[in-house]
Image: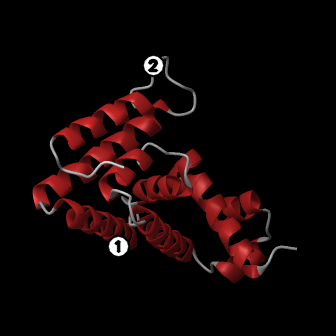
Amino acid sequence: MATSRSRHGEILAAFRRLVLEHGDRGATLDAVARAAGVSKGGLIYHFPTREALVTGLCDRFAELVDEDLVEMTTPGRSPTEWYLRTSADYLSELEQTMAALVRLAPTDEGSVRPALRRGRARWYECILAELGDEQLARTVVLLGDGIAYNAELDGQSGAPRPFVDRASIEALLRMVRALGLVRGI
């Protein structure tokens, strides 16, 4: 039997999936309850309103950013390289959660955009601490965003030649290293 905490996570995962697959309008409370395999009462116990689901997804995003920052700052690891490499992993829970929040932003602007901006600011600060140059740190974040966008665009269907592949990320990192911007690992 699932614990209350795991049920909470399952409901958020179902909400995220529905947003990604069917958009904001397809992620109704009834649809979330069905997708999570809970009764409507069970859903409402955990998330009494749709706004509570959105807030829950924003909170989960913050937790995932915290986990990512721990990985980024592991001794001997370059945060810049970590950020650029992991931006291509569009199937990770972090990237999927961020993608769902981006889709929700136009209709839930009050909570979603600030959550996304806080995550971006935290990554930026970590990269800035490594690089020591504000414009360069912003550029790295933008490069990561482009990698993430293109990885999601290609998807699992595997475009005949994916735009973002391991070789292109490694070439980008070689260029960044050649400029002396990050330490090699």
Kindly identify the amino acid type of the residue bearing the numbered disc 1: Gly
Q: Is residue 165 visible?
A: no
Q: Residue 91 location in percent, x, y?
A: 55, 46
Between 38 and 94, the residue placed more toward the observer is 94
Callout 2 environment at 10 Å: few (<14), some (14 to 19), or many (20+)?
few
Residue at position x 79%, y 78% in the image = 3
Dot 1: within a 10 Å radius of its alpha carbon, few (fewer than 14), some, or many (20 or more) residues? few
Left or right: residue 147 versus residue 34 is left
User: Above or below — where is 138 with respect to 125?
Assistant: above
Q: Name above or below for residue 41 compared with residue 17.
A: below
* Residue extending furthest toward the right: 1
Residue 118's label in the rendered image is none
User: Is label 2 in a helix, a strand or a loop?
Assistant: loop
Q: Which residue is mark 2?
A: 161
Query: To which quarter of the image does residue 171 belong?
Result: top left
> How far from the left and from the top, in percent, is residue 134?
12, 61
Q: In this picture, is 30 found above or below 141?
A: below
- Asked if the residue at tag 1 contacts the one at tag 2, i.e. Cβ–Cβ closer than 8 Å, the answer is no
Q: Nearer the viewer, residue 110 or 175?
A: 175
Q: How is the image coloured?
A: secondary structure
Q: Which residue is mark 1?
A: 110
Residue sitting at 50 percent across and 73 percent down?
A: 63
Q: Is residue 54 left or right of residue 6?
A: left
CA separation, marks 2 and 1?
39 Å
Task: Write the residue at 66% across / 59% down.
Answer: 14
> Residue 36's spot in the image, x, y percent?
74, 62
Q: How many marks?
A: 2
Residue 146: quarter of image: top left
The amino acid type found where label 2 is placed reads Arg
Q: Which picture quadrant has residue 164?
A: top left
